[in-house]
Amino acid sequence: MSNPTTPIGRDGAVTPDCGAIELIIQARDKDLGGFSVRRSLPTAQRRMVGPWIFFDHMGPAEFAAGRGINVRPHPHVNIATVTYLLEGEILHRDSLGSLQAIRPGDINLMVAGSGIVHSERERPEVTAAAHRLHGLQLWLALPEKDEEIEPAFHHYPAADIPALKVDGVALRVMMGSAFGVTSPVRVFADTLYVEAHLHAGQGIALPTAEERAVYVAQGGLTARDTAIPEHALAVFADVPGIVLQATEESRIAIIGGEHLGERFIEWNFVSSRKTRIEQAKSDWRNGRFAKVAGDETEFIPLPE
């Protein structure tokens, strides 16, 4: 187990001394207005893992009839958002005219590029009854050469995402290549994203990548005798032969990829340039972003 005297920093981050794990970040709760998420990235200790700059774990949340997710239109620039659900459904709309229900197992890739606006709500058929929502939402920083590409929307149904078993562990390779298979989901840099479901006692080798981390959505793991608890993100050193061992039934996400360099983040805007974020803030404040088709009336104001 991890050394109980290991220093704990801000945001609940722990620095183990096992050599394989650089940092363990305990996700912190973030209120999104009637709905709480657990946020692991960015933190003061670690802003990115590979191209991933934002990691939210939604739920599992129970909603009574008449209630649910209701995120008004808001903008993004210079990133791609990746939404994946374990339970429930979200209705995606954006300023390109996209209208797509996201269901468990699907991957929703929204490329903001030069700028996009979207909303995340639920269909009346869903909110009419009591229901659950559980999923992950991540942001990918784009390489500098791709930051201002045309915005785009890609939806990949669950059946298109490679699923396999390795040493009895059920895996899905969501993005990039791992365990001998490659996902069809578009990437812009070397990117790793794998979802796995382990039973107690099962283990898998951590895939290789320039930077790597594992988030425990449910359960608990060990890596070289260091415990990784539920709702924690463990950032790994560049050490070969690391095996993740489940101490109980666990659902995990493995993320990583190539280091892209420094990024600035403010509200929903991410860029390699501070001036680009200031421009995006001005554009949103002054109504210069395109409207969300079918959701033109409401919007989230720029925090001042």
Image (tube, helix red, strand yellow):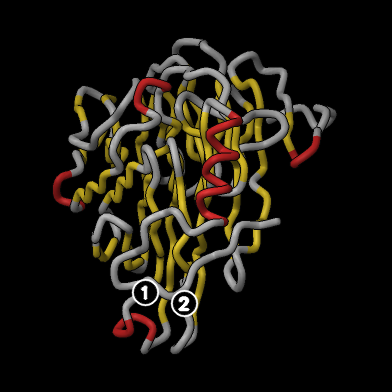
Residue 133 falls left or right of residue 103 = right
Q: CA distance from mark 1 to mark 2?
A: 7 Å
The image's mark for residue 122 is: 1
SS of the residue under disc 1: loop
Q: In the displayed structure, does residue 55 sit left or right of residue 182?
A: right
Q: Secondary structure at mark 2?
A: loop
Q: Which residue is mark 2?
A: 68
Q: Are marks 1 and 2 in contact (CB under 8 Å)?
A: yes
Q: For mark 2, does the 10 Å Cα neighbourhood hold few (<14), some (14 to 19), or many (20 or more) residues?
A: many
Residue 284 x %, y %: 52, 54
Q: Position of residue 199 (x, y in %)?
A: 40, 46
Kind of residue sitting beneath label 2: Gly
Quadrant for residue 275, please give it. top right
Instruction: Give the class, few, some or many, for how many residues have Cα within 10 Å of label 1's Cα (few <14, many ≥20).
Output: many
In the visual, does 169 lie left or right of 265? Answer: left
Upstream in the sequence, badge 1 or badge 2? 2
Query: Of residues 169 and 41, which is closer to you in this image?
Result: 41
